[in-house]
Image (cartoon, grey):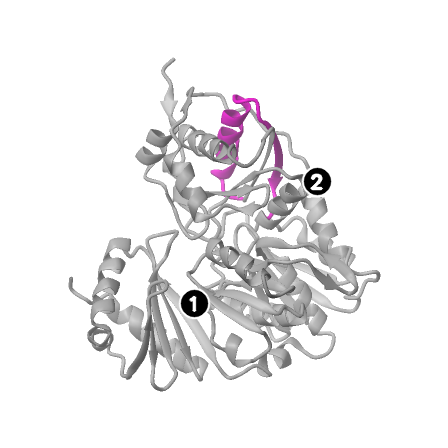
Amino acid sequence: MSTLMTKQVIAASGIAFGTSGARGLVEQFTAETCGAFALAFLNSLKANYRVSQLAIAIDNRPSSPAMAQACATALQAHDIEVIYYGVVPTPALAYQAMLDGMPCIMVTGSHIPFDRNGLKFYTPDGEISKDDELAIIETDLAFAPFTELPELPVNPLAAETYIARYVSLFDQPWLAGKRIGIYEHSSAGRNLYASLFELLGAEVISLGRSDEFVPIDTEAVSEEDKKQAREWSAQYNLDCLFSTDGDGDRPLVADENGDYLRGDILGLLTADELNIEALAVPVSCNTMIEACARFNRVERTKIGSPYVIAMFDELAKNYAGVAGFEANGGFLLGSDVTVNDQLLKALPTRDAVLPVIMLLVGAQRSAISTMVEALPARYTHSDRIKRFPTETSRTILAQGQDSPAVLLDKLGIQGEITTVDTTDGLRMTFANGEIVHLRPSGNAPELRCYAESESIQGARMLVQQALTQIQTIKL
């Protein structure tokens, strides 16, 4: 039987690392490709860790079980014990693996389209870095091809530990009398969220469970989903509506009126409730984070959790309470904190549950909508063009970096550009304080636009204008 080389198999697959994990089309993730990634990841750990066990979990995509089986089969052939946690949220897997001091692999495409999937990798200390990604791609390890993919027995521990992480913070059912709606769709956490909120005392209404995978993008919520949220809120008299993306690391939370909060607004309120001193946030987040003056230091990074996490070490030199969040709502706890006089351990990976828990803690003092209205009047909106070639996006933005005023004219947007930020994509700030930020997605052939204005209508108009006109640009 001929052997395969991990580097060659990965390169031939066409799969690349994006902002969070390796992503590609389902047909690119063959058994051999999944095995190659798993073994290359294992090999990359040898310099710093002694590994005998590795944990794996999946989301609800139909392609995910076979991908997990392929990773497990390759690892078991190299004498690695695989612990399979089945369908659980990514932060549940990461938290359990970190407690156990072992690496893990999450099989998930998160929010990206149905025909795609991905792999997320964690060392025993947390998410891999960009240097780790390069080490995986460059690993050249021989392995034998395999054809049989045996079933994996499911261990329930990660789900149980994740629920206990938050329930243990409270000594009474403090959500008694509250009605929490859970939009379950195909989320990886849909089988545990109801139990979690019920243990905290809430009455839970499960909504919208789907037998088909639903690629919810918390940064580009559809008008249909927004309308549905308002209808559910009114129909069931909800105090809060909670949902997540596909792998349960990005929250989607609506207030008592059924209006969804932007992810960075939710992150800001969460960090404030946790008494966080220093924040790391991507450049795409709302500038009200600085304007609200609730944090001692705010550092801006490139988009993607690895960049946010990389900033934590620097912030921890001078601040005890460190965290980060993204415009998609995922909250990353960079230090241990105290909640209700109980210790909450750091979890430096995106988490969807902590934000809704802390929002509901704050909502004991005032309605969620009131908490949002107390923030500075800065509004953001974002949307995307699907199936927009990444190379086209890069060419347009490269031209825009050279001549931003020319690009702005092509977009039909009036404004005097005062600042151009190329930290990640092209972010243009105007004299009137409005912002237009264009960026190719790191996970799929999509072009995203983020806009900021003094009104939500103004932000929406900027996004609509930019995305409509950019499709007419001739290269």
- The span picked out in magenta is 60-89
In front of the other: 173 or 120 = 120
Q: Mark 1: which secondary structure? A: loop
Q: Mark 2 near mark 1, Cβ–Cβ under 8 Å?
A: no
Q: Can residue 117 be seen here?
A: no
Question: Residue flagged by tag 2: what amino acid is it?
Answer: Leu
Q: State which quadrant residue 426 falls in.
A: bottom left
Q: In the rendering, at what x and y percent does residue 100 appear?
A: 67, 39
Question: In the rendered structure, does residue 65 fall within the stretch colored magenta?
Answer: yes
The one of 432 and 51 positioned closer to us in this rendering: 51
- Residue occupying image coordinates x 56% and y 63%: 315
- The residue under the point 55% across, 41% down is 123
Quadrant in the rendering for residue 118: top left
Q: Which residue is mark 1?
A: 283
Q: Which residue type carries mark 1?
A: Val
Q: Residue furthest left?
A: 475
Q: In the rendered structure, which disc, 2 or 1, sits on the residue that comes first in sequence? A: 2
Residue found farthest to the front: 317
Instruction: Residue 340: give x, y in percent of width and height.
Output: 78, 65
The label nearer to you, 2 versus 1, is: 1
Q: Which residue is identified by label 2?
A: 157
